[in-house]
Amino acid sequence: MARRRDVDADDIGLVEGVLDTNDLEAAGCVVCALGARRLRLPTAPQVQLPVSGAHVHSVAALVADAHALQRENQELCAQYELVSAHNAGLAAHVSVLHDRNLAILHRAREGYRAGMTRLEQALLSRERVERDYADLEGRVADFRARADRTEAAETLLRVERDSSAEQYRDLQAQLQAAQDQAADYAAQLARASAAPPPSSVPLAWLFAAQGERDDARAERDDLRVALAAAQAALSPVQARADAAEAERDRVRQLVATAEQQRDDALAKRDRVTRVLVVAEQACDGALDMRDQACRISTALRRERDAAVTERDQARQAVAPLEQQRDTAVAERDRARQAVAALEQQRDAAVAERDQARLELIAQRQQRALVAEELRVTRTSLSQSRAESEAAQNLNVPLQDDLRRANALLVAHAKELRRGATRIHELEESVATATTLRVAAESEMARAQAGELGAASRAAQYRAGWMSVRRSSQRRREAVGAQVYRLNARVVELEEERDLAIRERDERAAAWHRMLRDARRGRELAQRVRDELADRLAGVVMGTGGHIDTAGLIRQLEVTFAAAIDAAVPLPPAVPTSAAVPAISAVSTPAASVPAPAASGSGTRSGSLAATTGSTIGTSSSAGPSGSHSTPTSSPTSYPSVSQRPRSGAPSRSGSQSRTSGPSGAAPASSSRSSPFRRSRRPPR
């Protein structure tokens, strides 16, 4: 089968890798652009053939009728050649459509491979994120243990510092009392020095005063030593307290860094989840397209059955024509019996005519074989097109072109059958006219000239039929080669379809497993979120403060959702049209994250609230890039995923509001629903 060399598969332009209704019109052939002109048989001439054995009134009129019949025969031959040329054009058109199918299938296969590659990369990145998340959880647990130990040491240090301060105050009081007593003793000594001479002061009293003074001095020295020892003991305690406070601040910074890294890992995991949801939507769209291809294939089979019914009706309509042909043959036989004497004289001409008739019969049989081969080829082409269209992205313009080509082929086959019938009738008329003309020429002197003209025309007719037979042989060989290639292509398409089905099932099973793991991870993150909120409330209450964990979680969720919606754009909506079946998107409701129960926390505040506020400020200014800092959020703040509604299904909002109730409120029921629900596929 000849193919057009001026149309290439790369000429079909695709905008952003998406097929459009005008893609196939860009490199359309003449048959698609202008449409095939329906060939019609010329009107039958009003030639009245005389009855066999009747008297011929005018030989000139009889000769004119014979010439008219000959011209009509030539017109029919030209019409047959035109039909053959149109068939060749339709064959080229079918070849162009086949090339387009191959190009579209190749691009669809490349897109499928690219999608699988992106999906594998997303899965690998998700595994890495999960490993990083597990490492961060371990580090957070270590930091929590260190923070607990630091708090215990800080409490012990606070107790020791309080006891040391109490001892220091006691020593200060004792020192002050000793100093007062020493001052009293000094005053007494001064008074004693200013007293009368010793002769008048009793010595016992003087010795007693000196002894008390020495005791007071000794007690003062002891108090000074004890105060110095207390100050020396208080210095290490103060240093230990300062070191403990520095360690506590450093641990808090490490905990904040670990929480930020964990939030980054959660954000990355959410992005991977978005990619998985988009991949699942693409899989559902491919399934919908496959179902639509099955429905279109069923419609094509129905149209083919209708065409077969019309062909049978046409054959039934041809039956009366065959009866008329039999009647004409009977009349021809009677004419042959009437001119038996003339046929004996013209044995050579009759033998040549019989040979031409045999060649005509052989040519008719060959034409019938060619028509049958064309029908088989058309059937195989229809089957191969249906199977290839089931494996690729269908489009309505291509189906319209194929149906128009099939209709044109059927119409041309009918025209060929009617032309063959008409040619046969005209041959019978020509044979009758030739018999009458021979009978007339036997009575006239110009019979020899007419005989030579008839012989030359018969030779030309025979040469024409020989050329037609050679061209039919070449077309039959080309059709056989094309049928062989199409059969091989059908086998390849079946193998590719089975392989695609197996890969799709394997990917679907893997996606289901990953979705189950994602649900478990979400539930675990919710539990971790609640536990962290409770611990934060306990720490703040232990320091004597209060914090509103519900408001903090709501603020974190709102900030994280805004950052995600602004940083991660959704894919553009694909319009659904009747010309090109688009991918129907799956409407997936977002998982509402419940707020943790207050558990008697009340209003809370403290240094940890300030640290969390700084973390919120960091998350609101972070970008979505994987190499840069990513937005942080609460452990279980899942972003809502907005999806396009499936055609024919009610639209559901992808960004549902996250419900976080007040203290003591139960979580919303939507948190228990899976955010990865697949759409229900239409029955096959």
Image (tube, helix red, strand yellow):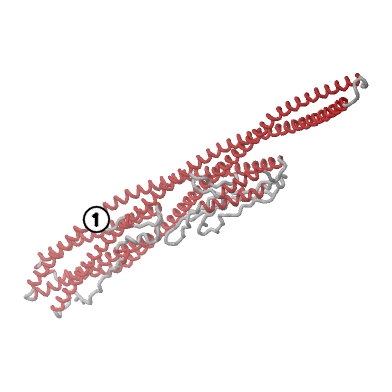
Q: Is residue 3 above or below residue 341?
A: above
- Residue 549 lies, in percent from the top left, at 67, 47
Residue at 91% over, 24% down: 196
Residue at 23% over, 67% down: 79
Q: Quadrant of residue 29?
A: bottom left
Residue identified by numbered label 1:
476
Residue at 64% over, 45% down: 610
Q: Quadrant of residue 397?
A: bottom left
> What is the quadrant of the N terminus in the image?
bottom left
How crowded is the residue under tag 1: few (<14 C-alpha within 10 Å), some, or many (20+)?
some
| Left or right of 512, for residue 194 | right
Q: Nearer the viewer, residue 248 or 531?
A: 248
- Residue 573 lies, in percent from the top left, at 48, 57
Q: Nearer the viewer, residue 211 or 379?
A: 211
| Left or right of 528, for residue 443 | left
- Residue 192 lies, in percent from the top left, at 88, 25
- Farthest residue, direction bottom: 57
Res. 313 visible in picture: yes
Q: Is residue 305 above or below residue 590?
A: below
Element class at badge 1: helix
Q: Nearer the viewer, residue 196 or 525?
A: 196
